[in-house]
Amino acid sequence: MINKIAMLSVHTSPLATLGGKETGGMNVYVRDLSRELSRRNIEVDVYTRSQDPTAPRVSHELAEHGRVVYIKAGPEQPYNKNQVYYHLDEFVTHIKSYQVAYDIIFSHYWLSGIAATALRQYWGIPYAQMFHTLAEMKNRVAQSPAERDTEQRLNCEGAIMREADRLIAATPLDKNHMMWAYGAPSDKIEIVPPGVDLTRFRPIPQAEAKQFLGIPVHHKLILFVGRMQPLKGTETLLRALAQVKRREPELVGDVCLSIIGGDPAQDSELELREFERLQALRSDLGIEEMVTFLGAKDQDTLVYYYSAAEMVVMPSHYESFGMVAIEAMACGTPVIASDVGGLSFSIEDGFNGYLVPGQDYKAMADKVRLLLKYPDLGEQLGEQARAWVQRYSWVNVADEILEVFERTTAHFQRNGR
């Protein structure tokens, strides 16, 4: 029986403010899964790199039976995550000083997998690994050398897939990517999707949501939520909106595209360049008055944006899962998304939203026009989306994860691996 879990999230804390540098779906996953496990009286320690020497080493804010332990590993400040690799020995050494007995390690992202390999040997327990994104798949859609991940990460991901006792894939396609691109053994991979907090992400009456946000009730809101990265395909959405405006200008007279994500104080150079590029493109396309960059928003505010929106658009070039789509659907909002990665599995075309070919702004424009023209259709899709997404409750996801952990520890005890 699983009673105590060591969770590794080396480069980012589950308590970090969302929307900034290196924060996103993985942070939500670690935080919300830990809280659901805590509700079952399972103890969870999340180990992460300290980025503030003045902060307490241990935080109990995570959950009743969960804590975040901040470990010194390199400079105690925001730091290039690829450079964190050279401080993993320090990270592991400091963790060993905590004399705690665990049943299993659950590591997130490739940096954590390297640390987990060392800790498994020290503690004599198995580890399960979830990557959240894969370097090989990101590199396949990269449009410039600056967007490509390092050979170091690629090699480490392959090594982790050989070493880990269990690999957690978010979708069947994610599993196939591990097998095709890295040669991961199929019998080592379990498919367990991420979850969504259905108490937080819930439908709010659209008029109420707009009033809360200060949006005129007659305005129609199109929403994008994601980092300022070329990988997120925001350019495709801007071009789609411009296409709608050219073809039916009367349709977009009261339409506003709100872009949520990014924090100029924390973003990387690549993200700042993308932000500047998108601002220039907005002007070039003649849609400056229709598009607003809002920066990062916390989840308690985000639920109002989802509920106020006519649609959420995800034009990504690659998504291992696509947490934003699930959050939007939980709020009863239809999603238009690129037919890529995990989005191909979370969107059932014509039932809870629409899928369009990746980077096809004309196809995306057609679906945007459809939902703007026929609001009753959007309401129907949203209702179906809300019903469909119940399967992704954290209660269900935690059940599946614990079942995988039980089998993994039993196999490890029988076979030593």
Image (cartoon, helix red, strand yellow):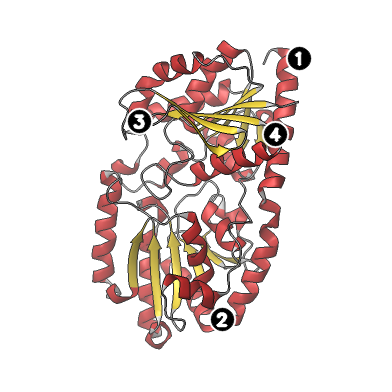
Which one is in front in this view, the residue at disc 2 or the one at disc 4? Answer: 4
Q: Is residue 19 visible?
A: yes
Please, what secondary structure does the residue beneath circle 1 have? helix
Q: Which mark is residue 82?
A: 3
* Residue behind mark 4: 41
| 97 relative to 216, above or below | above
Q: Earlier in the sequence, mark 4 or mark 1?
A: 4
Instruction: State which quadrant residue 219 falls in.
Output: bottom left
**Is the residue marked by circle 4 packed among few (<14), some (14-19), or many (20+) residues within 10 Å?**
some
Query: Is residue 365 among what the camera can see?
Result: no
Residue 406: where, in percent of width, then height? 74, 28
Examine the rendered structure and indicate whether residue 327 appears above or below residue 96: below
Q: CA distance from mark 4 to mark 3?
A: 35 Å
How far is disc 2 from disc 1 in space, using C-alphas? 58 Å
**What residue would you read off at disc 1?**
414
Q: Residue at x 45, y 25 (%)?
A: 156
Q: Is residue 111 left or right of residue 285?
A: right
- Give the quarter of the image for residue 29: top right
Measuring 73% from the left and 15% from the top, which residue is drawn there? Answer: 413
Disc 2 residue type (three-letter) = Pro
Q: Please, what is the three-letter code of the amino acid marked with disc 4?
A: Asn
Disc 1 residue type (three-letter)? Arg
Which residue is denoted by mark 2 in the rendering? 375
Q: CA distance from mark 3 to mark 1?
A: 36 Å
Marks 2 and 4, how far apart in space? 45 Å
